[in-house]
Amino acid sequence: MKMKYRLNHFVLGSLLIFIGCTSEEQSTDNEETRFEEIHSFEESSEVVISLNKGERWQANLETTEGIGQMRTKMDGFNQDAELTEYQLLSAELSADFALIFKKCTLTGPAHDQLHHYLLPMRIYFKQMKSSDLEERRVAFNSLLEWLNEYEVYFK
């Protein structure tokens, strides 16, 4: 089962090749640099998420909990909210997203697939800050649907 999503291959490839998950021992400067690089991707190319020979990838507990926290925040949100509330939600979700990256302990193909799954979320966070209410709602619903896809690919 494969899903295609638009991302910049060059930036994503660079991230996956040159940037591993952050360990507790890495310096704050390295974390900030990596986080900025994660945020710099563009949505102009495809990324494919796949299963592990038909099975879900094993994720670390912190990632699964982080995704769960994001889903809980989304479930409790009123889509008729004002722009400032969408912006606040987007900021909270972005912070959860950053924490997932910080606590990532995966390596190899599971790590790569997790990054394929996580990076498209940045598009939704950005769109949720739009001045257009309909665009915010579409982004909200797309992100909620995407968060629900986590269990398709990871356990």
Image (tube, rainbow, N blue to C red):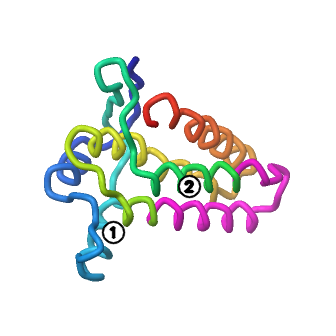
**What residue type is disc 2 on?**
Phe
Q: Is residue 136 above or below residue 37?
A: above
Circle 1 — which element?
A: helix
Closer to the chain start, of discs 1 and 2, is: 1
Find disc 1 in the rendering and name its residue. 36
Is 87 on the left or on the right of 36, as rendered?
Answer: right
As for residue 92 lying within the magenta part, the answer is: yes
Find disc 2 in the rendering and name its residue. 125
In which quarter of the view is residue 103 placed? bottom left
Residue at 34% x, 67% y is 35
Q: Is residue 68 above or below residue 145?
A: below
In which quarter of the view is residue 137 placed? top right
Residue at 38% x, 21% y is 2
Residue 139 in the image, given as x and y percentages of width and height: 63, 44
Residue at 82% x, 57% y is 81
Residue 75 in the image, given as x and y percentages of width and height: 75, 48
Bin the neighbour count of mark 1 within 10 Å (Cα to Cα): few under 14, some 14-19, many 20 and up. few
Do callouts 1 and 2 mark residues in contact (Cβ within 8 Å)? no
Residue 8 in the image, given as x and y percentages of width and height: 29, 44
Bin the neighbour count of mark 2 within 10 Å (Cα to Cα): few under 14, some 14-19, many 20 and up. many
Q: Residue furthest left?
A: 18
Residue at 37% x, 23% y is 55
Q: From which residue to which does the magenta span run?
A: 74-98
